[in-house]
Image (cartoon, grey):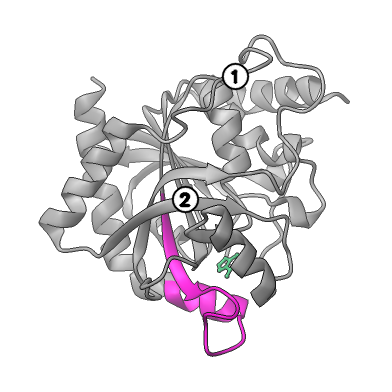
Amino acid sequence: MTPKEQLESCYRFVSEKISFVPKIALVLGSGLGAFADKIQVTATLNYADIPNFPVSTVAGHAGRFVFGICDGVPVAVMQGRVHMYEGYTPQEAVLPIRILHLLGAKILFLTNAAGGIQPGMKAGEFMLLTDQISSFVPSPLRGENIETLGVRFPDMSEIYSKRLNQIIRRIALNEDIPLKEGVYLQTAGPAYESPAEIRMFRTLGADAVGMSTAIEAIAARHCGMEICGVSCISNLAAGISPTPLSHEEVKEAGDKAAPQFEKLVRTAIAQIAELTE
Ligand code: HPA
């Protein structure tokens, strides 16, 4: 099955099950999945119940679409995502994003847990994504271009929308939520980085590092979605952190950050919906 055929088959299945047009699509990263329980749910769909759909296997990632209303705004939430380190191709990893686009979402709000590299960063803070480095992972646009989604050589000069970022910045300031900003770098994972790799990433201009998001953002820009992204800095990156890194630490940080995260995301959804009416 080609990536195009896989997308068409999954989209057909989802659209036959769900007659819901989301305004905003939201991807919840490690430890941040609880947000989906805070919306007024109209339907859910487990990834595992969609034939040919890539299924997430990571603890802390529920692996389903949640459709519902958040303060009056129709949203589609990915509670859990699939990663390349699970063995999926980059095309498979971005398939859910493309489905959300086909369902009608014009805005994509990406979230993740990430290791902090920027000097002065603290675990538990958030980072607004202003740009990204995806050069260490293969492109999700590799192979035959799906012309119905976008052009062969899409522009990436403003991956993260300046106007959406302005909204998020203002909310963080008003709500007293610590928000750094910077460049997110995606690695292939699943091992955390070595201290030497982190020093290299810092030299290259990265402020935070994680194992997702950048390829999703590329696929979303390819099909014309407007994007914003927030990392939860769950730990300081290897060599900066005084202790070894663990997935437990990452999930715990997500749980701790949950109330502020919910406030930031919920308020942002309402204001972004107003802006794009
Ligand atoms: N490195 C890569 N991915 C991560 C990290 C990290 O330090 N923390 C959370 N996800």
The amino acid beneath tag 2 is Val
The residue closer to the viewer here, 95 or 208, is 208
Instruction: Give the image location of residue 181, x and y in percent.
Output: 35, 54
The answer to whether residue 58 is left or right of residue 38 is: right
- Answer above or below: position of 9 versus 182: above
Say which residue label 1 marks: 154
Question: Residue 198: horizontal and vertical position, in percent?
Answer: 61, 68
Which residue in the protein does label 2 denote? 183
> In the picture provided, is 42 more to the left or to the right than 100?
left
Q: Disc 1 marks which amino acid? A: Pro
Q: Is residue 61 above or below residue 83?
A: below
Measuring 77% from the left and 28% from the top, which residue is drawn there? 142
Q: Does residue 67 show up?
A: yes
Q: Going 65% across and 17% down the picture, which residue do you hit?
A: 153
- Quadrant position of residue 226: top left
Question: From the Cβ of disc 1, is ligand 1 less than 8 Å away?
Answer: no
Give the residues in magenta. Answer: 230-253
Task: Locate the N terminus and report the quarter of the image it occupies.
Answer: top right
Secondary-structure class at tag 1: loop
Asked whether, in this view, residue 125 is left or right of residue 253, the answer is left
Q: CA distance from mark 1 to mark 2?
A: 20 Å
Image-quadrant location for residue 193: bottom right
Residue 249 location (% of width, % of height): 53, 80
Identify the residue at the far right of this view. 1
